[in-house]
Amino acid sequence: MPVQGPRNIPDARFFQCAGPFSLAEIAERIGANLEDAAKGNLIITDVATLEDAEITHLSPFVDPRYYSSYLATAAGAVLTTRHLSEKIPRLDIGLIFSETARLHYASVARLFYPEAVRGCTIGKLVAVSDNAIVGADCEIELSAVLGRGVVVGSRCRIGCNTVIGQGVILGDGCIVGDCASVSHALIGNGVEIFAGARIGTAGFGFSPGARGPIRTPQLGRVVIGDNVEIGANTTIDRGALGDTVIGSGTVIDNLVQIGHNVRIGISCVIAAQVGIAGSAILGDDVMIGGQAAIADHIVIGSGARVAACSGVMRDVPPLTTVGGAPAVPIRQFHRQTTALRRAKFNRSDNAPK
């Protein structure tokens, strides 16, 4: 059977839709504004992209780069901002306005595709130690392993071939993806750990010896707050003596390396392939772009921003944006970039003919 090409509508084989809903109900449920009350009775069966939507679909339009897709859309309803709506023709469709349209689209998607309610099930070949405690309404899939003294809260889901090591505590409503491993960790409520992540591994701690590096025992833990998201194949090392700490509400992308004794505040956002060396400290609401590198023992203040591919080698004050390698305040980085470009052009102009 041939494989279908790209399709930007949720596939019913993988996602169960809870719709339909009227447009008025959607606006009320997410707390957004319906432009024309006469469109409130329009029945919306699903969400879809502007390009693939049909008359019974709702699409988000939150980026002006998709202006041409908006003009050509067959969607029956569009969620957008008032700022964008002032610059677009009014098509004969239902418009829902929100100044935080991206955030409200997340609410719409959860309305149509809520988390499935599951009973307590334990798959085949699961190894659960006798003194492990598993809460109500949990799902433990094929070949998972729960070690001695593990405590799993209620409504948790543990994926296939996942290993939860001795003494680990998982709060309520946690999800641990397939083939992940968690050890030496205390984890709060509502934490999602994606497939292949490694939590609590030994940190990269060595001392020079006469015959080569000697590993320093890693005797700390990983402490993760509530509602943290940890991406696929991300590694968070346990502390060398104290703890590695991830604050509540922080979101960590795929393929991130967090070294031992790192302390990350609440509601931080860390993009893919970031490396944070040991004992670095991040305040609250810090954002780090993809492939940035943070040196050990660096302090990044609350509300700071680090541009993608930067190398942070000095402390960053709160509410400061830095970029480059070594990272400097972003305006200085732009001036340096401009100066280098001008120098390159000048050399080209003066080159021998």
Image (cartoon, grey):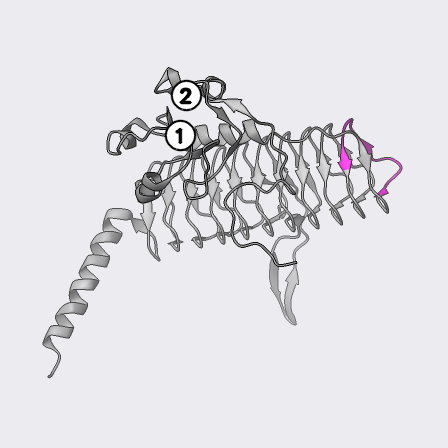
| Residue 320 appears in the figure | no
Q: Which residue is mark 2?
A: 32
Depth check, front residue: 41 or 129: 41
Q: Which residue in the structure is indicated by mark 1?
A: 79
Residue 288: x and y in percent read 42, 45
Label 1: state its secondary structure. Answer: strand
Residue 73, picture quadrant? top left
Residue 33: x %, y % from top left: 38, 19
Task: Report whether residue 347 is seen.
Answer: yes
Q: Is residue 97 magenta?
A: no
Does 287 sit above or below residue 310?
A: above
* Disc 1 packing (10 Å; few <14; some 14–19; many ≥20): many
Secondary-structure class at tag 2: loop
Amino acid type for the residue under numbered disc 2:
Ala
Please give the name of the residue rendered at 86% of the width and 40% of the height, measured from the top-left corner: 129
- How many numbered discs, if any? 2
Amino acid type shown at disc 1: Leu
Q: Is residue 137 magenta?
A: yes
Residue 167 is left or right of residue 83, and the answer is right
Cβ atoms under marks 2 and 1 closer than 8 Å = yes
**Residue lying at 53% horizontally and 30% vertically, measured from the top left:** 45
- In magenta, the rendered stretch is 127-139
Residue 278: horizontal and vertical position, in percent?
53, 50
Please report whichever mark, 2 or 1, sits nearer to the chain's N-terminal start.
Answer: 2
Quadrant for the C terminus, please: bottom left
Q: Image height check: is 206 above or below 223? A: below
Q: Residue at x 57, y 35 (%)?
A: 228
